[in-house]
Amino acid sequence: MIRSSMLFNIPAGKHSKRDIKEMLRSHPEIKFVSLVGLDIGGYDTDEKIPVELFIENMDNFLIKGVQTDGSSVVLPKIAEINNAKLDIIPDLSVNWYVDYNFSHLDEETRTPVGTLRIPAFLVHNDTYQVGSRVILRDAVDSFKTEILALLKKHPEVFTELSIENADDIEEIVLTAATELEFWVKTPDDKADREQLSTSQVLKEQYWKRTVGPVRTALEKSLLILDHYGFEIEMGHKEVGGVKAKLGHSGDYDHVMEQLEVDWKYSSALQAADNESQVKYIIKDVFRAHSLDVTFMAKPIEGVAGNGEHTHMGVAARLKDGRQVNLFSANNPKTDFLSPIGFGALLGILKNYEIINPFITASNDAFNRLKPGFEAPVCIVTSVGHSADVPSRNRTVLIGLVRDATNPMATRFELRSPNPKSNTYLVLASAYLAMLEGIKASVESGKTSEELLKVLSKSYGEETFYLEKNREYRSEEDVFEAYSPSERAKLFGRVPLTVYENICAFDLYPEKMAILRANDVFDEITIESYKEAILGQWATELRGRIIPNIMDLVRECKKLHIEVESTDLDMLNWKTIHNLRIDLGQDTISSKCLLTRIKMALDQEDFESASNMQLEMQQKIQELIEVYIEYKKNLF
């Protein structure tokens, strides 16, 4: 089905009219063109333009793009029903990819029918550029401009970099990469939480050999992704899953496994675009092998969720062609990082409260960030026990990745994002926070050794930058070394719902200035994002989560017969019955918890709804645990 003669991408340097026309004409399997714009919620557009029409009107499409109904995308307060003019303008600075439909073969070439997907910018009312790709582009531009000006103003920083002076720098380069985890299963199979949990504890699945349709789909995905030029580094099984069963037909069924795919880093904007295309390909290939793929953060309660660890680096490309990692120390055997590297890390840690709303933006995402599943729950970093022996701590929010023999490998790994996080906004907000920390560190004149002491400050110790009553570094297992109350005291209380998280925009006005610098996130963009995320949270809570909880409550039925039951069975059932009433059954004089949450949402009393959501989660967890114990004790 896949042939080497097929066109998989049009690189950034080949976007002239002549090149585009020549490539499309020589590849008749490409039948459509789609301009892909991203709204504030991270949803993309996908219109099908016949390729012949695109070629005939290429000037118009490349310059003016296509117009769409702005009220149909997620841009509240910006493009609404009475002000909905929105244009999708192609981005000529990044790679374009061909999206193939493996279920639809072209009759002439006998290859899959392709759609050329062109990443694009959204423009409202002809002048106002909006959406996720615009924000990341502007954040990258702001970072590059500000850092270069900072280096010119403070030449003393070059004593700790492998660069003589700012005049040697051709360009600042921001690099990023994501690690994509996902669950794959046969359709309609339901999870056995106990089997999955036991398998996870025993580490029966991690890095094991794939078999059957999962192996075939994974191998085909990796081969196809390489055709696109993503430079795949590996694909492997992750910690979650159970062993598939071989059915009577000779085919594997009851597949339920967690996988990960990694590929090479790119520039920040290109990395986010690449991730979107990788997800489409993986879903299509696995679906062709009768397997469902989910990128949800926590598709199965009680076992490992899907993370998307996000790697970020900063380098300088010099006029002599060399590239220097600005995070790397001159002497990696004695120093963990350069002052710029320490500044970037300090910036993320100090300002994470206003980054988090872009990372953890759904009920699903909060389900993943719980102790016990290698998911970060507090604002803390690890850089290693000593500079000469790089180490990794998987329990922290952001870790330092380095190789003392390879300075270009030095980067930060942000562990909180998941595959549903909007990578464009994650990278944009993270780099802006880094920028502020780098400015503060360089302007302080402190050395790498002094900045390490700042990072390693104790609770109550004052520094030039970090907050007094906080700690920010731990080389311990933060789940084992600290109690929940100790973690909250030392590393800050973490938000527990989408509403609590989005409130950070109002709770930390001094930190919001970082996002608003150079109008990267202007006021209307922040307000648009807040309304979009709160609307999605409230709608899902009322229309999906509460009905699902009610179904679960109804499933917890009385199973015992009085004469065959023990006193423990009676006690368990009484607890179950009371929880069911508290959660889901109204009386004449009082409303149950689920009803009260719906009433609060209808009145837009989001604070009360958020508090009751936490109460609901606690009660439903108790109900599940007691009901499992109740069933197990019955003959």
Image: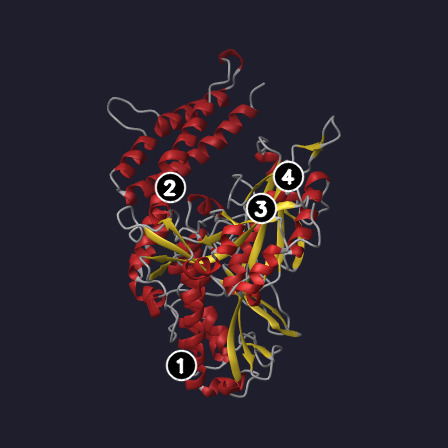
Label whose residue precedes the other's in the sequence (3 or 4): 3
Q: Are marks 2 and 3 in contact (CB under 8 Å)?
A: no
Which residue is the site of mark 1?
A: 443
Q: CA distance from mark 3 to mark 1?
A: 43 Å
Left-right relation of 168 to 82:
right
x then y, percent, for residue 33: 52, 51
Which residue is the site of mark 3?
A: 182
Q: Are marks 4 and 1 in contact (CB under 8 Å)?
A: no
Which secondary structure, mark 1?
helix
x then y, percent, for residue 114: 59, 48
The amino acid sitting under disc 2 is: Leu
Label whose residue precedes the other's in the sequence (2 or 3): 3
Which residue is the site of mark 2?
A: 614
The amino acid sitting under disc 1 is: Glu
Name the residue at the top extreme: 563
Label whose residue precedes the other's in the sequence (3 or 1): 3
Left-right relation of 513 to 589:
right
Which secondary structure, mark 4?
helix
